[in-house]
């Protein structure tokens, strides 16, 4: 009902809509309408109410509900169902709980995470209303060994969506997007599978959109940044989310339906911040130095350890 009222107000553009009309439309009392209008105001919608004229929508908040991102979406199935939370421990955790019953493309998104997670049990800082903290439920019928490619598709899609906003970024293989050498986005892909069949894949993405300098404290003070810090401008989270989902669906369906991973590879290679650099590859306690010479057709990092010994790295930690 609340969503219905919002829809009516949006359709009515700049005009007033009388309480009487809305109550007739939904066949409920005007007091009930008034209650819903107040809830909408609490959510950040600016609604003018004038006696005898009714209600008028002045502005909508930058929140990540389906109602707010719908107008930016061109997708068929990615993001067509959204579980929206004001606060949650971790969207990846929630997505895993519901994945088996949900359709592919369903998203769990929250304004804040209290226990956001990175890889290997590390944490992910996710302050309220300032970023995009979300998880996409996917059900690709592919060899479980190929799931790492989905992280690459996610990274390529984030980078393209930023380009759509005229923001230049780099991909730090395998799961980071960086600007000025600092991390603006991280991806955590998790899966549940049988021997050669995937039950589901959860692709969790965190994008630091409007975090301020003071949000980067402690461990992340020198490693993280946000789009706002880098561009000096507040960025519309709902628009960026829509752009990302559109880009992701395009690359993902092309990979699943046409076995086309080349488009993603091209982007990951073009935007790679690692190719040509001397790096350290960290695998557990093992650390080796080498030079990144490329990304192979499987999306793996090619590292030259000297004496023409080039190894392909499937996963791990790279430090520049
Ligand atoms: C990642 O791990 O980069 C994956 C991050 C995935 C986060 C999303 S948010 C939605 C979904 N739900 C979740 O619970 N998680 C996903 P990793 O490569 O391990 O990097 C983690 C490291 O990045 C931490 O140890 C910190 O040093 C740093 N870090 C933490 N929060 C950060 C932030 N907001 N911005 C930049 N760096 C951060």
Image (spheres, rainbow, N blue to C red):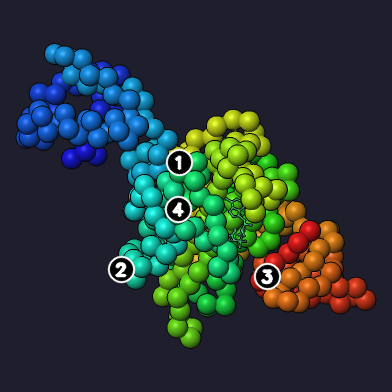
Query: Distance of mark 1 from mark 2, alpha carbons?
Result: 28 Å
User: In front of the other: label 1 or label 2?
Assistant: 1
Cβ atoms under marks 1 and 3 closer than 8 Å: no
Cβ atoms under marks 1 and 2 closer than 8 Å: no
Residue 295 place in picture, x, y as percent? 73, 65
Label 1: few (<14), some (14–19) or many (≥20) C-alpha neighbours in 10 Å? some
Residue 280 place in picture, x, y as percent? 80, 66
Quarter of the view holding residue 172: bottom right
Sequence order check, earlier mark of 4 and 3? 4
Where is mark 2, residue-wise?
Answer: 101
Mark on residue 129? 1
Q: Is residue 192 left or right of residue 308?
A: left
Mark on residue 261? none
Mark 4 CB lies closer than 8 A to ligand 1: yes
Sequence order check, earlier mark of 4 and 2? 2
Q: Secondary structure at mark 4?
A: loop
Cβ atoms under marks 4 and 3 closer than 8 Å: no
Where is mark 3, residue-wise?
Answer: 316
Mark on residue 113? 4
Sequence order check, earlier mark of 4 and 1? 4
Residue shown at 79%/58% (left/top)? 320
Residue shown at 36%/25% (left/top)? 59
Q: Is residue 211 left or right of residue 286?
A: left
Quarter of the view holding residue 151: bottom right
260 is higher (above) or lower (below) than 162 = below
Sequence order check, earlier mark of 1 and 2? 2
173 is higher (above) or lower (below) than 180 = below
Query: Distance of mark 3 from mark 2, alpha carbons?
Result: 31 Å
Label 2: few (<14), some (14–19) or many (≥20) C-alpha neighbours in 10 Å? few
**Ligand 1 found in image quarter:** bottom right
Sequence order check, earlier mark of 3 and 2? 2
């Amino acid at each position: 009902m609340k969503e219905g009222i919002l829809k009516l107000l949006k359709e009515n553009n700049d005009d007033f809509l009388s309480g009487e009309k809305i109550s007739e439309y939904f066949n409920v009392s005007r007091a009930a309408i008034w209650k819903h209008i107040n809830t909408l105001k609490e959510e950040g919608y600016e609604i003018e109410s004038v006696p005898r004229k009714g209600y008028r929508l002045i502005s909508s908040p930058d929140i990540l509900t389906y109602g707010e991102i719908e107008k930016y979406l061109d997708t068929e199935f990615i993001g067509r169902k959204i579980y929206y939370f004001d606060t949650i421990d971790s969207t990846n955790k929630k997505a895993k709980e519901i994945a088996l019953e949900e359709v592919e493309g369903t998203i769990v998104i929250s304004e804040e995470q209290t226990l956001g997670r990175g890889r290997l049990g590390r944490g992910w800082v996710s302050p309220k209303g300032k970023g995009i903290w979300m998880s996409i439920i996917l059900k690709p019928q592919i060899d479980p060994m190929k799931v790492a490619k989905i992280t690459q598709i996610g990274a390529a899609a984030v980078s393209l969506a930023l380009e759509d906003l005229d923001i230049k970024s780099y991909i730090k293989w395998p799961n980071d997007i960086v600007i000025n050498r600092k991390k603006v986005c991280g991806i955590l892909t998790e899966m549940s599978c049988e021997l050669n069949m995937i039950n589901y894949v959860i692709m969790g993405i965190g994008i630091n959109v409007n975090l301020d300098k003071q949000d980067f404290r402690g461990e992340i003070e020198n490693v993280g940044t946000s789009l706002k810090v880098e561009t000096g401008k507040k960025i519309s989270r709902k628009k960026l989310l829509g752009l990302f989902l559109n880009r992701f669906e395009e690359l993902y369906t092309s990979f699943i339906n046409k076995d086309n991973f080349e488009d993603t590879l091209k982007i990951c290679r073009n935007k790679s911040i690692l190719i040509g650099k001397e790096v350290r590859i960290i695998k557990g306690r093992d650390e080796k130095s080498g030079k990144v010479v490329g990304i192979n057709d499987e999306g793996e990092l090619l590292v030259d350890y000297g004496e023409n010994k080039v190894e392909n790295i499937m996963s791990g930690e790279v430090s520049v």
